[in-house]
Image (cartoon, grey):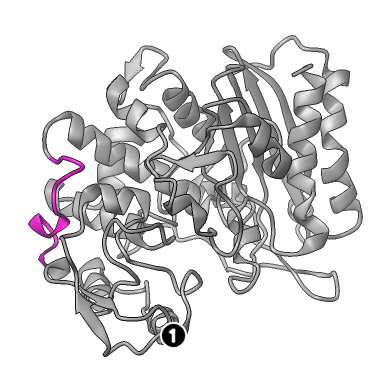
């Protein structure tokens, strides 16, 4: 898609915070994209995708998008809902018997052998909204956190699920939101319904129809040179090169529906445009309008929003749909999270990849970096779309604010 006609000089002011971080040696590079009303107005290619090899960031650079995978997996699940193959109210044990008869911790953070029976089954909706009682090691405390940290993702999905299912739930299904591996579980559910790998399910139902040719759970060997290197900012303000090693060149045994996609700015733009346009883009319908409405509608109760999200007051002026955050009060949301009109939806990735789509302005903004966070005390910052260190936290919000200012919004 070619660049639009807005004066480049006006939008170029949004680069400043990113260039400052790169010049200070805190960030290797970034790709950003601004799309509005059918046009790509700007693409910034800043810094390097690999500093040591002197390879610049480019528009087609491939990024690990971490939790930006989650909405893609949910969208694939909603195509099955459109076909009547599943319903949000269905108990997941229908396909995942491992999750039958679950137990719930008697006390959060307490011993794993002090439990109560779950009052009701986990549903598909619970998985999509992180209200199942499942968790991540960094979203809970005590023995449950330790137990989650010991479960390896480097095994086949059935064995992984058996280990997860052997642990008690953090809380009763439906009671509250705990960020979790529920979308990985949802991916396994899709594999069992369709009888094929999640890579193939996503390719057939979302990635193929949207022509997201560079998106998948692996990077083909011919494209490996386009992949951005993962960096980690150390305590001494130096960048640790290649913090994750090279991407796989074939699909891994466990394609994690919550975490492991690779993608590019233009590929993910097509996905965001599809959701913004009610399920259809460039004449191709992927989802029904009703399924998109469900994804983009806040489903959390007032009481559920009183709980912090990973230690952060995440729900001020915002709610949560089917793995999409949704702006419900732009004035209140803006104070903490920056601009975005009512209905603005998003879900970022922990390695610093971020995007949002603002229906009030027919606008999509994207910011892609590769920076490995600390999944401990700084997990909230990582999930909020920034890297985990304070020096970099303001880079992305400043980029977004300056983008809105340049567009006179």
What is the span of residues highlighted in magenta in the rendered image?
86-97
> Vertical placement of 271 versus 49: above or below?
above
Could you say which is closer to the camera, residue 205 or residue 323?
A: 323
> Vertical placement of 159 versus 341: above or below?
below
Q: Is residue 57 visible?
A: no
- Name the image quarter holding the C terminus: top right
Q: Is residue 135 visible?
A: yes
Instruction: Look at 67% across and 40% down and name the residue there.
Output: 367
Q: Is residue 395 magenta?
A: no
Q: Is residue 96 magenta?
A: yes
Farthest front residue in view: 303
> Vertical placement of 125 versus 99: above or below?
above
Residue 402 in the image: x percent, y percent? 81, 31
Question: Is 72 on the left or on the right of 404, as rendered?
Answer: left
To which quarter of the image does residue 3 belong? top right
Instruction: Look at 38% across and 58% down and name the residue there.
Output: 176
Say how many tags the image has.
1
Q: Badge 1: how crowded within 10 Å, few (<14), some, or many (20+)?
A: some
Instruction: Look at 51% across and 72% down and name the residue there.
Output: 138
Residue 135 in the image: x percent, y percent? 39, 68
To which quarter of the image does residue 207 belong? top left
Could you say which is closer to the camera, residue 35 or residue 88?
A: 88
Circle 1 residue: 146
Instruction: Look at 53% across and 58% down and name the residue there.
Output: 309
Residue 45 in the image: x percent, y percent? 75, 37
């Amino acid at each position: 898609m070619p660049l639009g006609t807005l004066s480049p000089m006006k939008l170029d002011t949004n680069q400043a915070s990113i260039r400052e971080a790169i010049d200070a040696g805190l960030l290797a590079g970034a790709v950003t994209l601004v799309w509005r009303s059918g046009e790509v107005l700007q693409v910034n290619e800043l810094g390097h995708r690999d500093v040591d090899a002197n390879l610049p960031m480019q528009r087609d650079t491939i990024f690990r998008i971490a939790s930006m995978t989650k909405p893609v997996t949910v969208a694939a699940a909603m195509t099955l809902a459109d076909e009547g193959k599943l319903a949000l109210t269905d108990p997941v044990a229908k396909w995942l018997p491992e999750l039958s008869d679950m137990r719930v911790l008697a006390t959060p953070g307490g011993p794993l052998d002090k439990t109560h029976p779950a009052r009701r089954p986990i549903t598909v909706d619970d998985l999509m909204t992180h209200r199942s009682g499942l968790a991540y090691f960094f979203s809970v405390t005590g023995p449950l956190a330790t137990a989650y940290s010991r479960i390896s993702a480097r095994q086949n999905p059935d064995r992984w699920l058996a280990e997860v299912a052997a642990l008690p739930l953090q809380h009763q299904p439906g009671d509250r939101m705990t960020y979790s591996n529920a979308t990985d579980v949802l991916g396994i559910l899709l594999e069992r319904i369709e009888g094929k790998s999640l890579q193939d399910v996503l390719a057939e139902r979302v990635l193929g129809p949207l022509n997201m040719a560079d998106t998948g759970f692996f990077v083909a060997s011919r494209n490996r040179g386009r992949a951005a290197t993962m960096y980690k900012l150390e305590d001494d303000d130096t960048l640790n090169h290649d913090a994750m090693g090279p991407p796989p060149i074939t699909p891994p045994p466990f394609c994690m529906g919550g975490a492991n996609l690779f993608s590019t700015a233009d590929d993910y733009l097509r996905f965001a445009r599809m959701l913004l346009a009610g399920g259809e883009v460039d004449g191709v319908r992927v989802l029904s309008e009703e399924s998109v409405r469900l994804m983009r509608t806040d489903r959390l109760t007032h009481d559920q929003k009183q709980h912090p999200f990973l230690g952060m007051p995440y729900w001020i002026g915002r709610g949560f749909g089917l793995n999409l955050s949704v702006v419900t009060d732009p004035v209140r949301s803006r104070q903490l999270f920056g601009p975005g009109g009512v209905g603005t939806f998003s879900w970022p990735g922990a390695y610093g990849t971020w995007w949002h789509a603002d229906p009030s302005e027919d606008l999509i903004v994207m910011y892609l970096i590769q920076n490995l966070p600390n999944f401990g005390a700084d997990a909230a910052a990582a999930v909020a779309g920034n890297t985990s260190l304070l020096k970099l936290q303001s880079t992305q919000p400043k980029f977004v604010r300056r983008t809105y200012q340049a567009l006179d919004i």
